[in-house]
């Protein structure tokens, strides 16, 4: 039996607690365990590192139910099993992006969906279209909070204008328990928008709850690099000369049609009505691949494109699309119903879509697939205590160029240490402590990864790049 297969007897025997998953660095903070617990005392809280974690009575008493609904549990159904149940008749299957009916690249032509979104506007357009066609009664998605921290939260929107408030990317901790409870209380059909592990968590909850099974009609997935902690935006504030308590809102990707889409700009709204902006490449932690403030569970994720969602959306990070500041989506459609929905809209001229193959989709997310397949296999081979992840990628310690192994190791170090160094700097009221450390680590990372600066020249001499690396 492979590590990804689970017999019924195994599922019954498996017992885990949220505390065990947290200690193992495998809690993503999705809130599924709190939603499943159904207790007034169960809740999510923000820990000292700015990450959401559960507080439930299950922390002391293990539960097979929890083991089956936690998206990173080694005992829960994996993405292949969930997709096989939901999309059994899919036209295509690619082991990198899962089952699907079709893939597209393009954007929304009608209205201002494209201008309002971080990318091509397809995710928000689809959610609004589901409401307009009365295919759902509400859409669960992430929206800005009303001026106070936390800056974002999940909300169920029942009007198009409310859905559109949730446009744009949100690299901030949020959790699902509140909207799951609302779905249980309010009859109707719902769509949920989320990153891969959140979509998976909702599917696992649906498996155990007939009410959710009936009411959660569509899953809209967002391609994901990794989850950040709340300290990411606080670091932005420090680097713009502000305190986090003076910030009332954040736009992680301020759009500028005159610049390439992948030139990110962070934008902060201040309590006095002013604003601050800075390009990501001028921030010490603005290199996404370095992994600053990454949730540790993301080191053990093998789903880049939300394989269990009915439709998934990402950025088209290949030319000529990456240079188009207006934004362009790559879309994977798995639901035949949604395939017909967007097909009709494209025929009507409301969407600009070109069909592509799975290889094109993989090219748009090439770095993510390297990190979550090749890099994951390498990380799985490392010794660890506590709960061991069970992934679709087998552990593999050998066969990688030394330089590539150094990159994967360095990302793990940065993602782990950034939480602790920032916590220390925050406690001591010394932002410079974190900023100097992050600046040094960024120089080291970019030297190793891209051969930049004197670090790159030094590393090139002692660990030359191998052919194909």
Image (cartoon, rainbow, N blue to C red):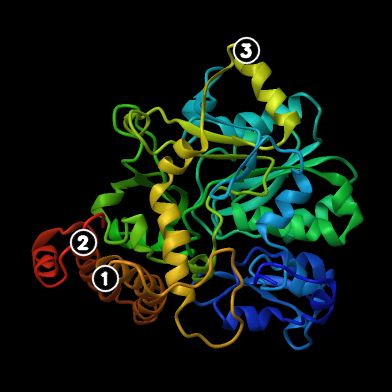
**Residue 129, percent from left and from top:** 70, 26
Task: Answer left or right for 68 relative to 100.
Answer: right
Q: Residue at x 60, y 58 (%)?
A: 174
Estimate the spatial distance between the alpha carbons at disc 1 and disc 3, rounded to whole Å.
50 Å
> Residue 119 location, x and y as percent?
46, 34
Residue 262 lies, in percent from the top left, at 34, 40
The tag earlier along the polypeptide, 2 or 3, is: 3
Q: Does residue 4 appear left or right of residue 331 in this picture?
A: right
Looking at the rendered structure, the secondary structure element under dot 3 is: helix
Q: Is residue 9 above or below residue 367?
A: below
Could you say which is closer to the camera, residue 84 or residue 24?
Answer: 84
Q: Which mark is residue 347?
A: 3
Location of residue 336 (image quadrant): top right
Mark 2 vs 1: CB contact within 8 A: yes
Position of 326 relative to 143 (above/below)? above
Q: For the residue carrying disc 1, how many other residues have a C-alpha within 10 Å: few (<14), some (14-19), or many (20+)?
A: some
Q: Is residue 101 above or below residue 156?
A: above
Q: Quadrant of the C terminus?
A: bottom left
**Local secondary structure at mark 1:** helix
Density class for disc 3 (Cα within 10 Å; few <14, some 14-19, many ≥20) is few
* Mark 2 Cα shell of 10 Å, populated few (<14), some (14-19), many (≥20): few
Secondary structure state at the residue bearing disc 2:
loop
Of 279 and 429, which appears nearest the observer?
A: 279
Q: Nearer the viewer, residue 346 or 428?
A: 346
Contact (CB < 8 A) between labels 2 and 3? no
Give me the residue at 65% from left, 60% from top: 175
Q: CA distance from mark 2 to mark 1?
A: 8 Å
N-term-proximal mark, 2 vs 1: 1
Residue that label 2 marks = 466
User: Left or right of 391: which side holds 360?
Assistant: left
Toward the viewer: 408 or 444?
Answer: 408
The residue at the point 62 percent across, 67 percent down is: 29
């Amino acid at each position: 039996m492979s590590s990804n297969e689970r017999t019924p007897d195994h599922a019954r025997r498996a017992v885990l607690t949220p505390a065990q998953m947290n200690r193992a660095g495998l809690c993503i903070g999705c809130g599924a365990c709190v939603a499943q617990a159904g207790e007034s005392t169960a809740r999510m809280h923000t820990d000292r590192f700015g990450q959401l974690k559960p507080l439930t009575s299950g922390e002391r008493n293990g539960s097979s139910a929890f083991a089956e609904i936690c998206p990173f549990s080694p005992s829960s159904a994996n993405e292949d099993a969930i997709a096989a149940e939901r999309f059994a008749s899919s036209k295509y299957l690619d082991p990198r992006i899962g089952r699907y009916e079709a893939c597209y690249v393009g954007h929304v032509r009608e209205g201002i969906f494209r201008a309002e979104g971080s990318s091509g506007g397809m995710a928000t357009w689809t959610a609004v279209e589901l409401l307009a066609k009365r295919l759902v009664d509400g859409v669960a998605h992430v929206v800005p909070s009303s001026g106070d921290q936390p800056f974002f939260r999940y909300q169920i929107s029942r009007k198009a204008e409310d859905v559109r408030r949730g446009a744009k990317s949100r690299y901030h901790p949020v959790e699902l328990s509140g909207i799951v409870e609302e779905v249980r209380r309010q009859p109707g059909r719902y769509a949920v928008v989320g990153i891969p592990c959140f979509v998976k968590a909702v599917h696992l909850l649906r498996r155990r709850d007939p009410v959710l099974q009936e009411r959660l009609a569509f899953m809209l997935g967002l391609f994901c690099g990794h989850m950040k902690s709340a300290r990411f935006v606080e670091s932005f504030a420090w680097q713009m000369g502000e305190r986090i308590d003076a910030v009332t809102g954040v736009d992680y990707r301020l759009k500028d049609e005159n610049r390439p889409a992948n030139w990110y700009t962070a934008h902060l709204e201040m309590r006095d009505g002013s604003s601050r902006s800075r390009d990501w490449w001028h921030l010490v932690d603005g290199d996404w691949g370095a992994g600053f403030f990454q949730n540790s569970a993301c080191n053990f994720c093998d789903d880049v494109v939300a394989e269990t969602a009915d439709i998934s959306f990402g950025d088209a990070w290949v030319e000529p699309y990456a240079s188009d500041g207006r934004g362009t989506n790559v879309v994977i459609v798995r639901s035949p119903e949604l395939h017909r929905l967007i097909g009709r809209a494209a025929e009507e001229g409301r969407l600009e879509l070109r069909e592509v193959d799975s290889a094109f989709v993989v090219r748009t997310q090439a770095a993510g697939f390297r990190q979550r397949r090749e890099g994951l296999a390498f990380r799985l081979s490392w010794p660890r205590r506590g709960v061991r992840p069970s992934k679709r990628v087998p552990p593999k310690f050998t066969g990688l160029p030394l330089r590539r192994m150094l990159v994967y190791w360095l990302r793990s170090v940065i993602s782990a240490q950034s939480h602790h160094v920032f916590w220390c700097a925050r406690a001591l009221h010394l932002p410079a402590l974190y900023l100097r450390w992050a600046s040094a680590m960024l120089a080291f990372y970019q030297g190793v990864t891209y051969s930049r600066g004197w670090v790159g020249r030094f590393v090139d001499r002692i660990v030359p790049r191998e052919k194909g690396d």
